[in-house]
Amino acid sequence: MTSLPNTVHADTGAVRWVALDARTWEARRGSVVIGTVVFGSRYVVHLVDDDLTGFHTSLESAKAQLEAWVRWQAGPPSEV
């Protein structure tokens, strides 16, 4: 599985969603596009490198899949 680019991995901000049109949403961390959700007969999740794909019946679950992947890539919270 591909890791997030270092510029994204270092960014601790949340995933920001941008609606490109009525059927397409783009996920960003900082200025880096990390994936998209496209609606056809279902909501389809794609990472920009096609490393992750998912099919969902709701936009919320499609976004949750991509956001969970980002958290997984970041690893556990560091102890202070």
Image (cartoon, helix red, strand yellow):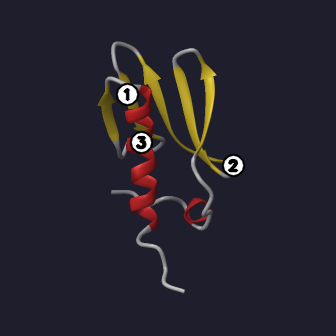
Q: Percent position (x, y) of residue 79?
A: 49, 84
Q: How many marks?
A: 3
Q: Mark 2 falls on what kind of element?
A: loop
Of labels 3 and 2, earlier in sequence is: 2
Please name the residue that numbered disc 1 is placed on: 44
| Residues packed near mark 1 inside 10 Å, few (<14), some (14 to 19) or many (20 plus) | many
First in sequence, mark 2 or 1: give its number.
2
Q: Which of 41 and 46 is in front in this view?
A: 41
Q: Position of residue 31 (x, y in %)?
A: 69, 49
Q: Nearer the viewer, residue 24 or 13?
A: 13
Residue 6 horizontal/vertical position (percent): 57, 66
Q: Is residue 17 above or below residue 59?
A: below
Per the rendering, the mark at residue 64 is 3
Decide: marks 1, 3 in contact (CB < 8 A)?
no
Task: Say which amino acid is labelled 3.
Answer: Ala
The structure residue drawn at horizontal position 46% and vertical position 24%, both measured from the top left corner, is 38
Q: In which quarter of the image is the N terminus?
A: bottom left
* Callout 1: SS: strand
Q: Give the residue pinned by disc 2.
A: 31
**Mark 2 closeness class: few <14, some 14–19, many ≥20 residues within 10 Å:** few
